[in-house]
Image (cartoon, rainbow, N blue to C red):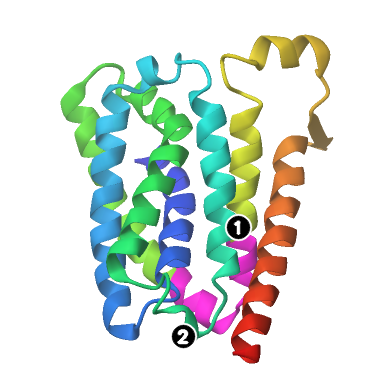
Amino acid sequence: MLINIVLSGDNAVVIALAAKSLPESQKKKAIIFGSFAAVLLRIILTVFALKLLTLPYLKIVGGILLFYIGVTLLAEGEGEEHIEDKGNLWGAIKTILIADVVMSLDNVLGVAAAANGNTLLLIIGLAVSIPLILFGSGIVLKLMEKFPIIITLGAALLGYLAGEMLFSDTAVAPWIAANIPGHELHLGSMHFSIPGLILAAAVVIVGTYLQKRQAAAHAAA
């Protein structure tokens, strides 16, 4: 339960990001469907987590996908004028599912370890994610509407997670440990992934640029 409280934060952010451009009538549906699907996917991934994370290049692909999703969600902007292109219910749910699969690759390991092989305990613990993600997404979405800077911070979070995944893939981790050992930034007791920080900044830069370019194109049209 404690692990899920911590791990549900990034899921709530990506659900809120994906739902932000939907019409008001569809936002709640996207949050509900996306949240329950996210929890179901997390349960499935937890069962196969140990095997999945031994597959080489899986995290690299996942990191690239997360970076793309972060840029895309930020580039969509604030306005309702994008609804006809990307702001549809099923498109939002698809984005939520893809992002959740990628983010959960690392997250489910902690839950699986805490369950200690007890499947029933595992499912009960993961069920706690439902209200956490559901209500957390709604709260984050309301905050995004009031404080748009949170949208940028949420997209940056996806970029940060992407950078972490790229450097922890089993195919490259030994080489990185031997050749790039200092890829973490230490600030007192806090540790930050330097690749994560770089990709977080890259998501914001690329996403903001695309957002401005789309706004200019709409204005010209």
Q: Residue furthest front?
A: 221
The kind of residue tagged 1 is: Val
Instruction: Name the one closer to the observer, 73 or 145.
Output: 73
| Label 2 residue SS | helix
- The mark nearer the N terminus, 1 or 2, is 1
Q: Is residue 193 visible?
A: no
Instruction: Name the one closer to the observer, 1 or 67.
Output: 67
Q: Quadrant of residue 104?
A: top left
Q: Is residue 135 visible?
A: yes
Q: Which residue is mark 1?
A: 71
Residue at (63% x, 34% y) in the render: 164
Reply yes or no: does residue 146 show up in magenta.
yes
Q: Position of residue 32 (x, y in %)?
A: 25, 64
In the picture, the disc for residue 15 is: none
Instruction: State the extent of the magenta-drawn residues as a range.
Output: 140-154
Assess disc 2: are there few (<14), some (14-19) or many (≥20) residues with their C-alpha within 10 Å of its C-alpha: few
* Cα distance between the residues tagged 1 and 2: 18 Å
Q: Is residue 154 above or below residue 109?
A: below
Residue at (62% x, 76% y) in the render: 214
In the picture, the disc for residue 80 is: 2
The kind of residue tagged 2 is: Glu
Q: Quadrant of residue 184?
A: top right
Residue at (42% x, 70% y) in the render: 86
Assess disc 1: are there few (<14), some (14-19) or many (≥20) residues with their C-alpha within 10 Å of its C-alpha: many
